[in-house]
Amino acid sequence: MEREVLRFSRVTYEQKGGVYLRDFDMSILRGEIMGLLPLNAYGLPSFLSLLKYNHPLYFGRVYYMGKLVNSWQDMKRVPNRVTVIGSESSLVAGQSVLTNIFVLRAGFGQYLIRKKMLESQLKPFLEDIDAGIRPDMRAEALSAFERVAVEILRAVVAGHRLIVLKEVGAFIGEDEKSRLYRIIRHYRDQGFSFLFISGQLDEIKAICERVSIMSNGKILNILDTKMINDKTGELLFYGYTDHIAGRLKEHKKTGAGRSVLELRDLNSGILRDISLTIREGEYLVIRPLENRVFEGLVSLVFGETKAEKGGFFMEGHEVFLPKTHRVVLLKEKAEDTMLFPDMSYMDNLLFTIDHKIPSVWLRKGVSKSVRQELSGKVGADVFSKSIRNMTRKEKIELVYARIMLQKPDALFCVMPFKEEDISMRLLIWELQELLLKRNIAIVTITMNLSDSILLADRLVQISADSGMEEYIREEYGPLSENVSWRDIFRKKDKRPAEKKGDNNGKILH
Amino acid sequence: MDKVFIGVRDKMRFLSARVLVCVGSLFLLFILSLAAHIASYPVLSTSLLILSVIDLIVFIIWVVSPFLRNENKIRRIIAGYMVFEPHDRRGVVLTPATEEMSDTVYGILNSDQTVSLNKRQAQYLALQNQINPHFLYNTLDGIRSEALIAGLDNIADMTEALATFFRYTISNVENLVTIDDELDNCRTYFSIQQYRFGERLGLSIEAEEGLGRYLIPKLTLQPILENSIIHGTEMKTGKGLTVISIRRTDLRIIINIKDDGVGMDEETLEKLNRKLDTGVENLKPSDRETGGIALVNVNNRIHLLFGREYGLHVFSMKDLGTTVEISIPAVTEETRNKKETADGA
């Protein structure tokens, strides 16, 4: 007899007049890794919040560990012992792994902390997961993979029988993914259940037994991952697949233009001798294979650390990227980090072109003509909206519209498709294509190749051990089993991928 | 004394009585507190004031909270959810009149006539094209004999299957049968359909051992299998497979009837699941066209027999097949008899 760890039975959830979950029906068994593939993000935050906190339901029932924990009729609710692990760390910075796992958990009733004893208790767990984590390591010193492993351990120690992993593939390196999957399977075999949320079907296929397809706050279908094939993927991402096919036909090979930015012999921390030339209008994807490489590179680009040797050069002159108008840097979740909520739409749009048009704030004609030009694309209403009241789509459009007006030589963006649903991924993709058409080079730094690879003219993989490897478009096919849409490239190219020289003809390492 | 206590307890089930008690005592405490204040008894006045605050807290817990629960229930009923509960599970109600009204509605919804009506409707659905099933059954038997005499084994087998199907459908007045009985009926129905579709149709039954003895409302699986063939696999080009899988969890028995047919779009799926949730739209003529009537009927009978926490849910996507999940409690003949004996005692 199987045991149901979680059961959402015909749950309808309303909040402030909006229906976020409708007839939501899903169950997870003991020792099961269930996948959740959201075709759009609608209702997903509400589901996760309900899962943890048992908010009042409009209709339906929720069972956890065989007990009715929430019902539309019942008004007594207590939070469920469920762990949700996402891109944001829930560990307490400044505290060790040991403290985070044992001391800071609810129900730890000891007044005197016997470190030696706790360490000996933690030791078998750390040996189990074999992730190279020491009990005295500080939370902030952990890589993304280590952090996820520690959060899983903390959930296991706290006895949380259901662990939700939200888009972990987006911020964990390719090699680390297989290690994480090993940890998940280890605890699955011990009776823990996992809900693995990902927008990438390949990731779900690699680890889950079943997958629930979610759209507009409903579970549309539950599929057995063994039965999923390429045709299923095409049917699931119907519009998206068509779009991809169309775009790939239209894709023009770029990268032969003038050089707009050079990374010359960059050395910093574990990054060694990174040399790259970025050309106008090209799309370059840099894929760090380990989290520490990713963090090192991002902090270099954003000027948070200084290169020990080498640097960024434009037309022969060294530049500091955050300070130059000719390069735009976009962090993850650009709509949250790149907009000023207290400023108006127009001010947010125009404030980066002051170097091009002096006294832009005083020239009403400029804002009027910009408004006229953009209203056809983004709608006229949006100009009077407060940033706080704008939808995510409108915010993303605003960020990219600003870049288009600024017209830099290059745009660096960090994981632009991270945790985005298909409609948002399509939108970002289209906006990036508009930039490419204006000859703006785009450099995407991402650990997850899905989506970015479709636009990329070149791909550079950086690893702490093997250095830098560069691939041109025709060589993407055999790259990795876990890259979405790889079949598109496989059809084109049957040759094996091999180490290539850079665009200057030098062999890099 | 006991009688008085029971009488008071019964009266306090009504919010109207609770409001009267709370407001009356609050008013009394306030007057007394005021009088004590005027008569310069500060300690007494303060004590009475504290008692008033306690009374107010009692009012919130004892009156406001159940009131909100009742309000929620009424809103769901307005929205179409038939959420009437039996007398002993109803908790606090608004007034004696609303209690009587709930009793009457619950009685109508759960009467033997309603259960029979739904069952008869299920039989009607299964035999909707037949004027007189008994006459047809007898005729089929005759045809079978003639076919055997003429050496037409295929026709004889097909007629026998059809006769077995009708016999199961029109006999056995019990509401509950075993899962094994239902699966047999599905196999019979499927063998009839196979004469029509040949190799184009496939059926696979996956059941954990020992689950066949659990009870299920009669004519639950066949109408869903029929739906799956007619609206799913029949419309598909190429071969189609329907899988019936049965498993038991600690909470329930789950029966999935899954096809790899044409599926349905999000909007149709939402409408169908909404019908299953509310269960009030089963008599609309348009349902016959969309094929939802059989599912709503099966769902209604499960609700009537086992309660609203069980029933049907449909999962489907265009071109990715449809799964109907049936959720029922794990009841066997023995556990049912035991329960009935205990209830009788």
Image (spheres, coloured by chain):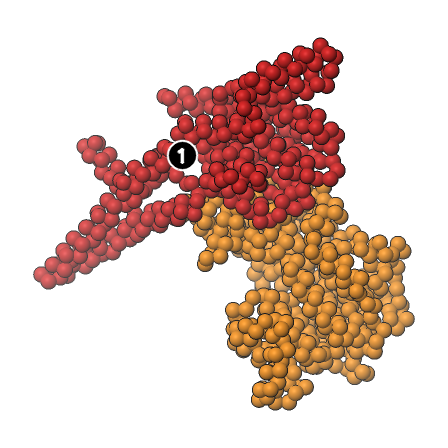
Chain colours: A orange, B red
Measuring from the top left, give residue A211's x and y in whole percent.
65, 45
Kindly identify the residue that appears in the image at 63 percent across and 71 percent down. Answer: A377
Q: Residue at x 72, y 78 (%)?
A: A408
- Classify B101 as above or below A101: above
Compared with A407, A86 (above or below) is above
Q: Looking at this view, is B24 or A93 the one in front?
A: B24
Q: Amino acid at mark 1?
A: Leu
Chain of the residue displaying label 1:
B
Label 1, secondary structure: give it: helix
> Is B56 placed left or right of A414 in the picture?
left
Which quadrant of the structure image shows residue A139?
bottom right
- Please identify the quarter of the rendering in which residue A400 is found: bottom right
Q: Quadrant of the C terminus of chain A?
A: bottom right
Q: Where does the image place residue A238, in percent across and percent down from the top left?
A: 70, 53
Residue beneath label 1, please?
B109
B293 is higher (above) or lower (below) than A369: above
Image location (x, y in percent) of residue A401: 65, 74
Describe residue B191's horizontal placement relative to residue B31 as left or right.
right
Residue nearest the observer in this picture, B312 or A102:
B312
Residue at 74% across, 12% down: B151
Residue A506 appears in the figure: yes
Vertical side of A4 occupied by A313: above or below: below
Residue A450 seen in the figure: no
Question: Is A152 in front, or is A413?
Answer: A413
Q: Quick one: which residue is furthest to the left in this view?
A: B39
Q: Quadrant of the N terminus of chain A?
A: top right
Residue A81 image point, x, y percent: 52, 48
Residue drawn at x 49%, y 28% is B119
